[in-house]
Image (spheres, helix red, strand yellow):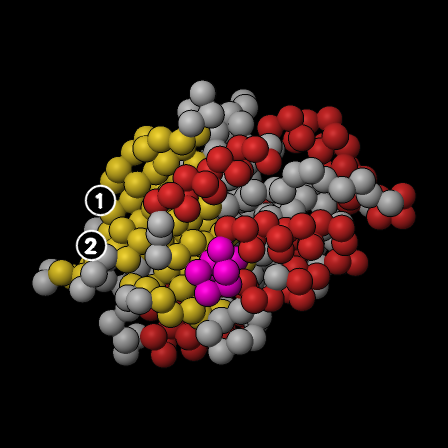
């Protein structure tokens, strides 16, 4: 079987932020706007994102996954530019997106990502409901949504009982197939930070322990991370990436993405991770290679 390569990037937090209308700045967005104008615009850079995406395209992966936080304050004026950005990355057959907490930042526009980016979120059956399942070569992508509006200063995510129950049915159905299952989820499955954790991760971890997947990809924390979780017969790697538009700042590394080369041999699945990151000269280069299985 030929090798399949998947590129994973996350949290592009697309700049520039459109100027909000006064009415849009009530509540949670007011703090978010201050944070953007004072800090975030300095290190979430469009030219960084464009450099990273050009490098991804030069690698010619078979598929590209974007695990949320395409926008910043979920202003109405952010959704169409985010769709245009997705289209510049690739078509909806070749690119899968899921939402993050910033894409459902406030109640007023919590449904808009769903409407405007539907082609990129939808499963093969066509509906943009979660979990969404897409089959690409030997890979099955299982997309989740943890994106819910939260109170100011909170960045938690929640799957909800209905989505978890639906995920269990999906995993039961997929058990009969010999596919490499990849779970896409914005929030990491474990977190020390209460204000930005996945509130029902215990339910998800229990499900994964029963049914398993081969790989979990997430964003949200804007750092490189590899954590292993218990599966039915072996541990499951969960990989996080930095923001795809970030300049290095504080404890946050520069923008990076991961390439996963997936292949089946006589001993089962092989998966090799390659990390490519922006260096101080704003060039993208490989910084790590690791055999995950
Ligand atoms: Fe983010």
Crowding at mark 2 (Cα within 10 Å: few <14, some 14-19, many 20+) = some
Determine the residue positioned at 23% across, 57% down. Answer: 3
Residue 84 showing in the rendered view: yes
| Residue 25, above or below 182 | above
Side of 10 where 233 appears, left or right:
left
What is the quadrant of residue 114 in the picture? bottom right
**Badge number at residue 270:** 2
Could you say which is closer to the camera, residue 199 or residue 70?
70
Considering the image in quadrants, where does the N terminus appear?
A: bottom left
Helix, strand or loop at mark 2: strand
> How far apart are labels 2 and 1 at the CA level?
8 Å
| Residue at x 54%, y 64% (from the top left corner) | 121
Q: Quadrant of residue 146?
A: bottom right
> Does residue 189 appear to the left or right of 98 in the view shown?
left
Of the residues under marks 2 and 1, which one precedes in the sequence?
A: 2
**Label 1 belongs to which residue?**
291
Residue farthest right in this picture: 22
Residue 12, percent from left and from top? 56, 43
Which contiguous range is marked in magenta?
Answer: 90-97
Give the main secondary structure of the magenta stretch.
loop
**Does residue 253 appear anywhere in the picture?**
no
The residue that appears at 44% across and 70% down in the rendered structure is 133
Q: Is residue 161 left or right of residue 291?
A: right
* Residue 226, numbered label: none
CB within 8 Å, label 2 to label 1:
yes
> Magenta includes 93?
yes
Mark 1 residue crowding within 10 angstroms, few (<14) / some (14–19) / many (20+): few
Image spot of residue 106 (x, y percent): 74, 53
């Amino acid at each position: 079987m030929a090798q399949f390569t998947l590129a994973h990037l996350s949290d592009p937090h697309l700049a520039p932020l459109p100027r909000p209308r006064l009415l849009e700045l009530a509540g949670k967005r007011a703090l978010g706007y201050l944070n953007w104008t004072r800090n975030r615009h300095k290190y979430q850079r469009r030219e960084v994102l464009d450099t990273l995406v050009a490098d991804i395209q030069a690698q010619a992966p078979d598929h590209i996954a974007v695990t949320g936080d395409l926008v910043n304050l979920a202003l109405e004026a952010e959704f169409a530019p985010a769709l245009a950005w997705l289209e510049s990355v690739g078509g909806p057959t070749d690119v899968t997106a899921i939402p993050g907490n910033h894409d459902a930042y406030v109640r007023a526009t919590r449904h808009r990502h769903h409407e405007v980016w539907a082609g990129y979120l939808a499963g093969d059956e066509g509906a943009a409901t979660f979990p969404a399942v897409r089959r690409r070569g030997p890979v099955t992508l299982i997309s989740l949504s943890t994106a819910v509006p939260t109170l100011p200063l909170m960045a938690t995510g929640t799957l909800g009982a209905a989505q978890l129950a639906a995920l269990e049915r999906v995993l039961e159905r997929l058990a009969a197939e010999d596919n490499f299952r990849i779970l896409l989820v914005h929030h990491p499955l474990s977190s020390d930070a209460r204000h930005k954790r996945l509130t029902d991760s215990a339910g998800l971890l229990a499900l994964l322990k029963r049914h398993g997947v081969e790989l979990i990809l997430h964003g949200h924390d804007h750092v490189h991370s590899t954590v292993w979780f218990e599966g039915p017969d072996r541990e499951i790697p969960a990989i996080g990436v930095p923001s795809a538009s970030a300049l290095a700042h504080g404890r946050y590394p520069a923008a990076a993405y991961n390439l996963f080369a997936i292949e089946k041999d006589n001993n089962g699945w092989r998966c090799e991770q390659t990390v490519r990151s922006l260096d101080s000269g704003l060039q993208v280069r490989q910084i790590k290679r690791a055999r995950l299985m």
